[in-house]
Image (spheres, rainbow, N blue to C red):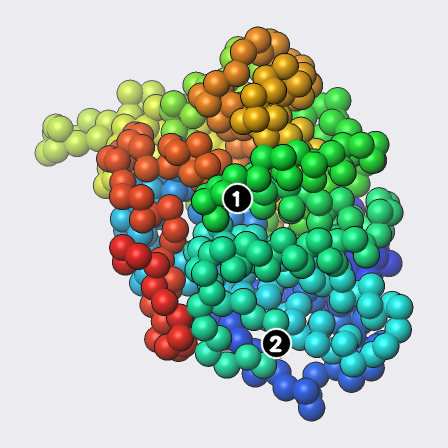
Amino acid sequence: MNNSYKFLFLVLGCLLIQLPACTNLDEEVYSSVTADNFFQTEEQLLAAFGVAYTNLYSGMGNKYGLISIQGSSTDELCTPTRGGDWADGGEWIRLHRHDFSPDDAIYRTLWNFIFGGVSTTNQLINGFETIETDLADFAISELRALRALYYLWAVDLFGNVPIVTAFDAENPPTNTRLEVYEFIEKELTEAGAKLSKEVTSATYGRVNYYVAQTILAKLYLNAEVYTGTPQWEKAAMACDSVINSGVYNLMPDFFDNFTAEPLNSSEIIMGVPYDQVNALGNNLHYMSLHYQNQNTYGFQGTPWNGFCTLQEYYEQYEENDQRINSFLAGIQYDADGNELEDELYEKFDPQNPTGPRDPDGPVLTFTPEINELEPGALRQAGARIGKYEFQTGVDSDLDTDIPIFRYSDVLLTKAEALWRQGNDAEALVLINQVRTRAGADMMNELSEESMLAERAREFFAEGHRRTDMIRFGKFNDAWWEKDPSSPHTMLFPIPTEQLQSNPNLKQNDGY
């Protein structure tokens, strides 16, 4: 998106007055801000309102974002160790194999992202509560719903976490997963009813009524995981609030949802409005592409040759399914159409005749098959993330926005909720809307396997795979380079750093 236009509409939408150039991922989760040094007037609070949203930039498209972690802990993504690249103390290998360690930076960064967002929304809510105006009341409702989104991620990733509603809370105790679930439901039900139903460019990226209903739908879809009690009917009803509004529709072209100009998308219910100057944090191109792809797009720097998909995930797509273009595979070319070459490709080494060797030679070729996860993964192995628009000439940060929720997710969520209640016919109608848009053949019958596979095809690299696999009972299965894992890994460990700083936290079982 044009930088100046994006920044302008964010300001007009009260999202931002000033965007930070970066986000400190090692910040203290429970802020030291106090009543006597926080914003004192409504004008000051409104000027700071967008800070609650800027935290999202650090949680989606970067190294430790939800796309990376939700994908790399499943059969969707992996980060092979190619020589010394991406070794990172073995944390990506442990993540893929479900050998989760509370000492790894992955979980500390995730925790700080979530509770940094909670802390900021609490600061603003507490400030607005001192001002008795309709505008303040509206702002509080929006912030409560945004806080509920952070807590949806918390209950999904970590399970038993503190419910914190005061910005100056010290050492809050752990709440049960059921208590967190009930808190989210209450917040969205109460606050969501007061939210605007307006959907314009000025509200893009913010929590409105339909966003709150979508969060509720996702909460209810996974209620059996979170509480032991399924809530399929409630999930379908929340979806109906979005569907029956007539506000959202599937875009004719699937990939129009992943461009630098997403404002015209009728499908994005909530997205993160990245900007390569003012709103940094979408590094998916650098994290996935090969070093030589710098010459494909004229990037200012060199990509990092990291994330790729597993072969079996790539092969789930039918030949006529347009969503197969979510990947980059095959021979790679420079901006003029010339084949790229990797001079450091793995050649036959007579000193190590059994060592890794790339059969494709120097021509840069992304093969769906990966020879091994570590330590000698081939530099060119693995189909790469190609779903998002990679603008020519950018550096490590893209303009491309990342959807948090899309209308297709609402359709497939309702379809699954109906199917689990025995209504296959209506579920098929909804699923085939999504498949028809993708150019895929109509589906005639439903099963757990087909339902999960359809979500895999539609939501590759959008941060949903782990949650979906857990709900379908597949997360602890074996897949490439991973043996069956213990059920305790369905929750990530509470980071050691947090346990040390807050003695009232309780580690999840198994760690």
At 38% from the left and 32% from the top, the residue drawn is: 474
Q: Nearer the viewer, mark 1 or mark 2?
A: 1
Residue 17 x, y percent position in the rendering: 78, 67
Note whether residue 93 is visible.
no
At 48% from the left and 48% from the top, the residue drawn is: 226
Q: Quadrant of residue 417?
A: top right
Horizontally, residue 285 falls left or right of residue 254, namely left
Decide: is 442 above or below 58: above
Residue 24 x, y percent position in the rendering: 53, 68
Note whether residue 425 is visible.
yes
| Most distant residue in the bottom direction | 36
Which label sits on residue 166? Answer: 2
- Describe the element under mark 2 as helix, strand or loop: loop
Amino acid type of the residue tagged 2 in the rendering: Ala
Residue 18 x, y percent position in the rendering: 74, 67
Label 1: how many Cα within 10 Å (few below 14, some 14–19, many 20+): many
Which label sits on residue 223? Answer: 1
At 80% from the left and 71% from the top, the residue drawn is: 47
Decide: is 398 above or below 506: above
Residue 308 x, y percent position in the rendering: 42, 34
| Most distant residue in the right direction | 134
Label 2: how many Cα within 10 Å (few below 14, some 14–19, many 20+): some
Decide: is 194 above or below 474: below
Q: Nearer the viewer, residue 234 or 477?
A: 234
Q: Quadrant of residue 134?
A: bottom right
Q: Quadrant of residue 125?
A: bottom right
Q: Quadrant of the N terminus?
A: top right
Amino acid type of the residue tagged 1 in the rendering: Ala
